[in-house]
Every structure is written in structure tokens, then in C-alpha cells.
Image: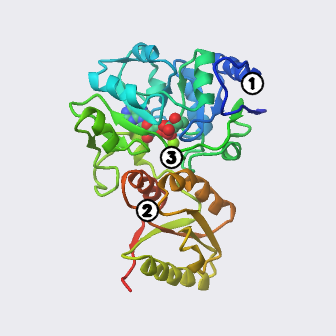
Amino acid sequence: MNTIIAAVDSGITEEEPNQDLELASEILKKGGLVAFPTETVYGLGGDALNPDASRKIYSAKGRPSDNPLIVHIADETDLQKIAKDIPEAAYKLMDVFWPGPMTMIFHKKPIVPDSTTGGLDTVAVRMPSHNVAYELIRRSGVMIAAPSANTSGRPSPTMASHVREDMEGKIDMIIDGGDCRYGIESTIIDMTGEVPTILRPGYITREMLEDVIGTVEVDPAILGEAAHVRPKAPGMKYTHYAPKGIMYIVEGESSNSVIRCINRMVKERQMAGCKVGVLATRYNAMAYEADEVIVIGDKKDELMISSNLYRTLREFDARGVDYIYSESFAGSSLGTAIMNRLIKAAGHRVIQAPSV
Ligand code: TXA
Ligand code: MG
């Protein structure tokens, strides 16, 4: 299949005509697939109410069909068409965080095909704030089912070039709208239970949600403390986000202890003939003696770290490293979401550095 690639300015407004968005709309209405930028990661979009389109999405990604898709909307009235029993708290959250990087789960109406929800009787819904995503939904009049536009198991795409790596030749069109601002997927919050529950952490934190609606719970499966607990978001159970190299996260009391521990392990792997990478924060980077040291950002700038995370993991793949040692970013608010992705990328391999 020939994949059309088109660039659309991320500053596009409602009034501005755009031929590429028109073409993308036609493709979506006919049941085709269009990858597009959002403020979190690139999405692989198809008509959420067309079972054939959802099936094509699973096949292009190589994704297990029990893993449901998020439906992207541009208007609150669309929500009424696909969801029922919407609680008051959901309207409060929408007022504050939509459009934006928050997904809510509701009981679904029959109009939403089982192939979109992986057979569940609930549906995940989000209104993206990226102008290109928003305008694509609005102009096409199609509610767009969109998982991240990566091959299943690879890091999510945060640039159009990542989407091309994984999807060129498999889908109808890729819209290049530049780099994604947040770089990790939306916060998912389940609104179907008595107490709203976070199923996937993201830029919108528990504290931000609690400021608006009071108590919010967190699915205990999220940080992997409870490996035996089955996550409520089916997609969270897969390894996910994995780079090709085997990755370890190294935690420690101080930067010095982490640097020393990582350098020791790097040397051991190199002696065994392996190519080794280190994922480092800016001020520590000079201290590492690895084949490939990639700086993810300043430790204090969590937004920079989250927006660079997946790009960095893909870069290690491109440089062909066998092992990756990463610093840890545990910390406040956004740190929870970053560590959730990083721990999964590392297949839960976390090492404690001995103190120096
Ligand atoms: O930021 C995002 O949310 C991006 C962009 C493209 O919008 N999308 C995204 O989709 O991350 P995906 O398919 O890669 O991840 C969706 C997650 C999966 O873990 C899935 O299991 C969960 O949402 N999910 C979807 N519908 C659900 C439902 N009804 N109940 C529980 N979990 C659900
Ligand atoms: Mg994904």
C-alpha cells in the first residue's frame, strides 16, 4: 500500500481551509486509516463506529484484539452518543481537562462496535487538544478510534518519522504535525466505579484530578509493586514500550552511587563484547564510560524528560545497543507516569546501586 505523507501546521485554525485534512477526512469516512499527531503521542486513527476500520487498526499494529481502543471526539455532544451513565464528576473533569491529555472510561452504548472496545461493555473516550487532531475529528465528523501509532511492543511515536518507521506501507496516510508536546500517553481514569480510579498515569496527575472531584484511587497494578494484580486497562498488562536492547533502571542514594554502579556494569558488558548505552540526565552524562550516552534532559524538568522518553528509547534501537542502563526519575507528579513507562520498557529490571 502506498502511504500518503502530508504535513499540516500544528497551529491550524478552524477557519483555515486545508486540502490534506480534507483528504484525510475522506479516507476516514471510507474506513481507511490515518495516523495523526496529538499532544501526547501520534495516534493511528480509524472510524470508531466502523468495525472494519478497528480491525484494520489491530492488524496494522499487530495488536492483540482484546486490547481496547480510545475513541477521540471533538465535541461533548459526541460523548452522549457513545457513553451512558455519565456521572457528575466526569462533567467536572471535562470542564477542566478537555480538550487535553485525559481519557475517561464509561459504560458504552450499543452503537460502539465490540471490535473497538475489545469486547468490553465500557468505552474509553478522550478529546485531544492538538489542533491537527481536533480539526481532523471536527472536519471529518468521524469519532476516531486511535491507539498509539507504533507497532505493538515498540515505544510510542512522538514524531512523524517514528510513525513512518512502523507504519509506512501499512496505512493510507500519515499527517506530520511536528513533535508531540507531552510525549507520554494520556492519563486514563475509570469513571464506572464508585470511586474514580486511575488506570494509567500521565500528565494529568492524581493531585490535579483530586483538586476537582475529591478522592481518586490508583489501580495498584500501575507501578508494578503488585505484580500479581491484573491491571484494569487490558493494554497495561503487556510488556509494551520495549526498546530492542535489554534495559535496566538503576536507583541509588546519590548521583555518585548510580554513576559508579552503572559504569561498573557497562564495563562488564563491554568485556563480554556487547555494545552498551546509558540513558542519562544532563549533568551526569559526562561521567559515563559507555559506547552510547544519550541525554534525556535536566532532572528537574520532568516535562522535558517525558517528551524525550520514547524518542530516546528509539534512538538506542537505531544505534544498535545490546544493553541500556538508565538513571531513575522517581519523584513528584509527572515522575510517576515517567517511571511507569520506564519500568515497563525495562521489563521491571530495577537495580539498587550500593551506597558509596
Ligand atoms: O494519549 C493517548 O491516550 C494516545 C493518543 C493517540 O490519544 N492513545 C493511546 O492509545 O495511548 P493506546 O491504545 O496505545 O492505549 C490505550 C489504553 C490501553 O492500555 C487500553 O487497554 C486502555 O487504554 N483502554 C481502552 N479502552 C479501555 C476500557 N474500556 N477499559 C479499560 N481500559 C481501556
Ligand atoms: Mg499504545
Sequence order check: which comes first, mark 1 or mark 3? 1
Name the disc covering residue 20, or none.
1
Amino acid at circle 1: Asp
Q: Residue at x 70, y 46 (%)?
A: 161
| Residue 201 on image: x %, y % | 39, 45
| Residue 236 on image: x %, y % | 41, 45
Asked if labels 3 and 2 touch by Cβ distance under 8 angstroms, the answer is no
Asked if labels 3 and 1 touch by Cβ distance under 8 angstroms, the answer is no
Amino acid at circle 2: Phe
- Determine if the C-beta at disc 3 is less than 8 A from ligand 1: yes
Q: Residue at x 60, y 58 (%)?
A: 312
Judging by the rendered image, the residue that carries numbered circle 3 is 184
Frontmost residue, 152 versus 276: 276
Q: Secondary structure at mark 1?
A: helix
The image quarter containing residue 54 is: top right
Amino acid at circle 3: Ile
Q: Residue at x 32, y 43 (%)?
A: 206
Q: Is residue 242 visible?
A: yes
Judging by the rendered image, the residue that carries numbered circle 2 is 329
Q: Residues within 10 Å of mark 2 (few under 14, many from 20)?
A: many
* Mark 1 and mark 3: Cα distance apart in space: 26 Å
Q: Is residue 67 visible?
A: no
Indicate the quadrant containing the N terminus: top left, top right, bottom left or bottom right: top right
- Answer left or right for 123 relative to 148: left
The image quarter containing residue 26 is: top right
Judge whether 328 appears above or below 253 on screen: above
Q: Secondary structure at mark 2?
A: loop
| Residue 224 on image: x %, y % | 34, 56
